[in-house]
Amino acid sequence: MSANFLDRLRAVLLAILLTTAFAVPALAGPFEDAVAKFANDDFSDTDEAIGAVAASGNPLAFPIISALQEGRLSADPETKKVFVTGADGKIIDAATGAAVDKLPDNAAAVRLNNRLRRAVEAAVGSLTLLSPDPAKRIAAAQSVFKSHEESALPVIDGALAKETNKAVKAAFAEARAAILLYKPDATEVEKLEAVAIVKAKGDQEAMALLTGLSNDVPPNVARAAASAIASIQSNLATWSMVQNAWYGLSLGSVLLLAAIGLAITFGVMGVINMAHGEMVMLGAYTTFVVQEVIRTSYPGLFDYSLLIAVPLAFLVAGAVGVLIERGIIRFLYGRPLETLLATWGLSLVLQQAVRTMFGPTNREVGNPSWMSGAFELGQITITYNRLWILCFTLAVFVILLAMLRYTALGLEMRAVTQNRRMAASMGIATSRVDALTFGLGSGIAGIAGVALSQIDNVSPNLGQSYIIDSFMVVVFGGVGNLWGTLVGAFTLGIANKFLEPVAGAVLGKIAILVLIILFIQKRPRGLFALKGRAVEA
Amino acid sequence: MTPHVLTRSLDRSASIFILVVAGLGVLIPLSNLLLPAGSALQVPTYLVALFGKYACYAILALSIDLIWGYCGILSLGHGAFFALGGYAMGMYLMRQIGSRGVYGNPILPDFMVFLNYPSLPWYWYGFDMFWFAALMVLLVPGLLAFCFGWLAFRSRVTGVYLSIITQAMTYALLLAFFRNDFGFGGNNGLTDFKDILGFNVQADGTRAALFALSCLALILTFLICRAVVTSKLGKVLIAIRDAESRTRFLGYRVESYKLFVFTLSACMAGVAGALYVPQVGIINPSEFAPGNSIEAVIWVAVGGRGTLVGAALGAVVVNYAKTFFTSGPLAPYWLFMLGALFILVTLLLPKGIVGTFSAWRESRKATEKANAESAAREDGVGEPNPAE
């Protein structure tokens, strides 16, 4: 490469630099002119500027419009220069994109009124229709669907032609249909097609769009819209049933989780543990402590905090349970009413102890990343934490069932439950089995506390709110039967959620309580009653 | 003249109890009203109201002891009957406010004006008359207990199952009364009372009279309970407590006995609530909280269940301790103490104060007698009399 060539190159570069430095104001194009209008502090000029900038196709258009929307666009009325302050605080010149150190002293934020705000929103919508991020394109298409602004039609048409992503394409087609439906000069055929597309979308918004249709549409279109509304309505009714069922399952899993430990202590051992709710609370506070330690010492482990908390909560609550059994309950076997009172007293002590140690207010327990967020299934939204809790509950249930069925301890537990004296004669250390059974029930309550800390407030009263519900589940399902607890929990959860839309949350709950009281009259031993002599004991 | 049935077989502790309550019921109001304020012997008005509260708690404790101590029914929802009686009285007191309320509506209580009630709900009719309200104080808790008991006892719901569904009952009522559209003032309940039977509720004289009335009600409740438990009916109740199936097989209709005593007990709890409300000046849904009912059970356990005197004593002792500790620097530890009380009493003092005391006295008497006999035998004074 010759020196001559390098010299010429340098000269050309210098020329380019000079032109950009001095000639830009003189050679200003339509985009720069439009941007300069923001500095006029005149609403109609701003309106024109928004339209021109949005239509320019310049890569700076989106940052400018979104800055305008969020009040981060400022202009200097003297020099007619306009500046964008980024969300991160960096300032650039709106016309050239060049970085600027600081705003001029007399720069003021560009003002908007309500009419302009709508224009800005529409501009943002049509600009994001061309965004490289498919999720943003879908969101933009949905906002166009809602606003069905005729002005967006050309952009949509253009975007639709270029679009390759299937989901985005569908969203664009829906948005286009919405615009055509409301466009007075669209043909009847176009409108009928649009109705079909909107009907296929089939959600609340589609229905709102169709019901909002004016009366002066052609009769064929009106008829098609009416039938589409009817079909969407029945579709939505089905989905709301599914939604209620899901909420019911979710509530049922929470009830099951809270009640499953009780099913062991009350159902299998016949011990009324009013401090059961406090075992749940201990589990929740264990989670809190684990997260605190992780936050201060090992921030990287935060996503594993629950996995660490589960065994710890089991051990903490289980150990407390064994202590309670050894210290109090074993002196009260055969006196269920006294057990009830003593454990109630214990629950007061535990609550107050936690209140003294951690304070009376709610403590913050965070969701790990894999438990936050939600996904859409058809027309319903399913949050990950509820889904995980449901899975977790079922896993705990299965493990417990397997434990009782296949392990030596499970066998001994069942033996002691069925006939204590016979079991003792066979060489089973019944008092040890009692302590371990109670510890197991309490430990499971502790695990429940870990899960409930994700959806409920962690406060000293956490346990109180579950104790009556848990007893209802166990009594309803039938004492001494884990399957009964499972069926009871899900029945109550689903019944509650189906009553709620009809009767309201509180009345629904009251109705459930009254129904259980009446149910107990009919079947005093619950859904799945133990048969045989054990009943009268 | 007291009917014979009420005074029958009063033993020494019962007589002492009645004399003490009657004495306090006369002396405290007199001291409050007649002695000059500031005198060492004058009982200040706030204490009169406090003692009146204790007397109401003692009635509630008696009603629980009647069913738990003598019939083995552990109700964890007796606070509901207490609160219902209280609400009936509160409704009368609300209607007495008339146009003196904040909004000055002659018919509607303030909270109804506030919540835009167009007119008085039907279930508030009649509560402007004292006799009607007094009837409701007995009838509403009684009727609820009758229906609840009829369902529960007939299908033989016993033991902890009954305890748990009584708890569910009071919990359901708690939720219901918290609702604004239920027509009982929601969260705030009924308060801001002005007068009762034309007397100012706040006045010293009214408070003294209410205290005396509470003592009278306590004595009457005690006599009724005593009459029940010493009668033949009482013997059947004790038989049910100790061996329910056996009693049924002997031909007694267990559920009728239980239903009678449960309903009677609920009426007593209602009266306690009705006397309680004008003395504390408020009734709100928190009275339905399951915790309150369980606390009332522990009063009975502390005093000694199945002793009546002990139940009343336990109510006063535990509540005095509560007042004493929760108002002092030890307040944060009160729940520890209450919890420990539950545990220690059930573990170490299953008969309660009065039960343990009488057991100790009887065993001392027995040893004294045995000592005397053996001493007499050693002295060779005579052969033991076979007629003894």
Image: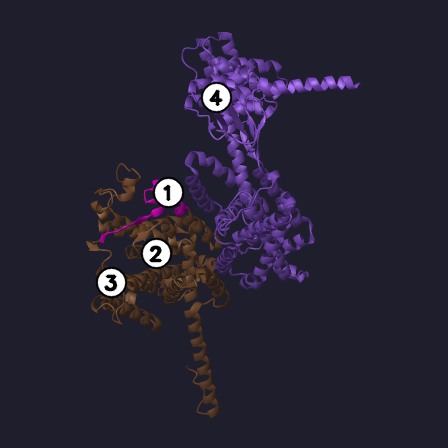
Chain colours: A purple, B brown
The earlier-in-sequence mark between 1 and 3 is 1
Which SS class for mark 3? helix
- Compared to residue A286, the image places residue B58 above or below, namely below
Instruction: Identify the secondary structure beneath mark 4.
Output: helix
What kind of residue is marked 4? Phe
Q: Dot 1 falls on which chain?
A: B
In the image, farthest residue toward the right: A1
Three-letter code, disc 1 = Arg
Q: Marks 1 and 3, Cα distance to the nearest angstrom?
A: 35 Å
Kindly identify which residue carries mark 4: A38
Same-chain check, marks 1 and 3: yes
Residue A304 lies, in percent from the top left, at 64, 44
Q: Which residue is mark 2?
A: B269
Q: Which residue is mark 3?
A: B208
Mark 2: which amino acid? Ala
Pick the front one: A271 or A174: A174
At a point 44% along the width and 39% down the height, the residue shown is: A505
Residue carrying label 1: B179
Q: Mark 4 vs mark 3: tell me if same chain.
A: no
